């Protein structure tokens, strides 16, 4: 039990819609990262938040945006959904530092139709 | 750039067989290396890690040694069990904040 919880677990949206995914970090962790895992692939880094500010971003367009709240929970927002956005979205919490591992939630399975 | 190349699967083994999953990496700087495991329908769980060259990570009978000279971090287990069936991801981190770079994953199925 990692203590990282994500909601919802599954979601179906229509192309062009907007979606918000939520993550509750493990207690004591100050950093949250979001990853996109397409079917049969490894997770791809979307962005990271530290102390409520974006602290790094992967190769994703601006329609992927996020927030981190004072209690270190986080949201991932995706606008103008495309079919290729269908994937498992993983939230990971950690302490900022070189050698610390990340603790992952179970993910949100997003299907865009 | 930073990247991980992982042995492609799927891999099918009989119970008690020896397991090796190859992983090599390219990195600018001195990364930490990780193996994560993903069971069906679940998120990623840390299996083991190594933070510097020649370190050996181990957990639940799995081992991997950080080899800087060959830029490798191969996962091994001497005797696999049916419960080890999962997808295994090699990853590097510790270079830019906590961003992880993952391989594409290797699916392992262990049959009785």
Image (tube, coloured by chain):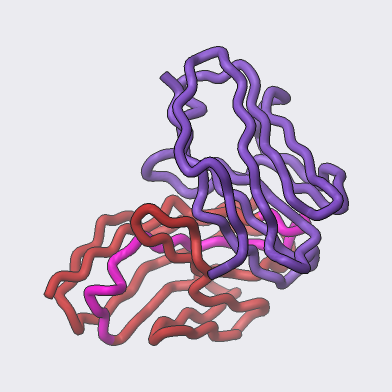
Residue shown at the point (14%, 70%) measured from the top left: B111
Q: Quadrant location of the C terminus of chain A? A: top left
Q: Which chain is red?
A: B
Q: Residue at x 67, y 37 (%)?
A: A76
Q: What is the span of residues highlighted in magenta in the rendered image?
A: B79-99
Residue B87 magenta-highlighted: yes
Question: Which chain wears purple?
Answer: A
For residue B3, side relative to residue A87 (left or right): right
Residue plotted at (37% across, 44% down): A40
For residue A81, side relative to residue A65 (left or right) = left
Can residue B67 be seen from the camera position used here? no
- The image quadrant that residue B99 belongs to is bottom right
In the visual, does B94 lie left or right of B16?
A: right
| Front position in the image: B81 or A26 | A26
Query: Looking at the image, how many numbered discs can be counted on the residues?
Result: 0
Residue A67 percent across, percent down from the top left = 78, 39
Seen at 61% across and 59% down, the residue is: A4
**Magenta stretch contains residue B31:** no
Q: In the displayed structure, would residue B68 be above or below residue A58?
A: below
Quarter of the figure with residue A7: top right
Q: In the rendered image of this protein, does residue A35 appear above or below residue B106?
A: above
* Closer to the camera in the image, A88 or B21: A88
User: Residue at the top extreme?
Assistant: A16
Expressed as whole percent of the image width and height from the top left, the position of residue A38 reads 45, 39
Q: Is residue B47 above or below residue B10?
A: below
Question: Residue B55: where, in percent of width, then height?
Answer: 60, 85
Reply above or below: A32 against B36.
above
Q: Observer-nearest residue: A77 or B84?
A: A77
Task: Locate residue A67 relative to residue B53 in the image: left or right.
Answer: right
The picture places residue B35, in percent across and down from the top left corner, at 50, 69
């Amino acid at each position: 039990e990692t203590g990282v919880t994500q909601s919802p677990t599954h979601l179906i949206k229509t192309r062009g819609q907007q979606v918000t995914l939520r993550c509750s970090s493990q207690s004591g962790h100050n950093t949250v990262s979001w990853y996109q895992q397409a079917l049969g692939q490894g997770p791809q880094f979307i962005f990271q938040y530290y102390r409520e500010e974006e602290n790094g971003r992967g190769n994703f367009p601006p329609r992927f945006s996020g927030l981190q709240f004072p209690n270190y929970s986080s949201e991932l927002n995706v606008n103008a959904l495309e079919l290729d956005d269908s994937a498992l979205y993983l939230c990971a919490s950690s302490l900022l530092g070189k050698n610390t591992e990340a603790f992952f939630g179970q993910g949100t399975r997003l299907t865009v139709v | 750039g930073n990247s991980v190349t992982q042995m492609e699967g799927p891999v099918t083994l009989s119970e008690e067989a020896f397991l090796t999953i190859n992983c090599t990496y390219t990195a600018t700087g001195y990364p930490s290396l990780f193996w994560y495991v993903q069971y069906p329908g679940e998120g990623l769980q840390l299996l083991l890690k190594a933070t510097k060259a020649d370190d050996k990570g181990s957990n639940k009978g799995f081992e991997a040694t950080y080899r800087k000279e060959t830029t490798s971090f191969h996962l091994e287990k001497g005797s696999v069990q049916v419960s080890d069936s999962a997808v295994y991801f090699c990853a590097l981190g510790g270079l830019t904040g906590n961003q992880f770079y993952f391989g594409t994953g290797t699916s392992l199925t262990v049959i009785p």
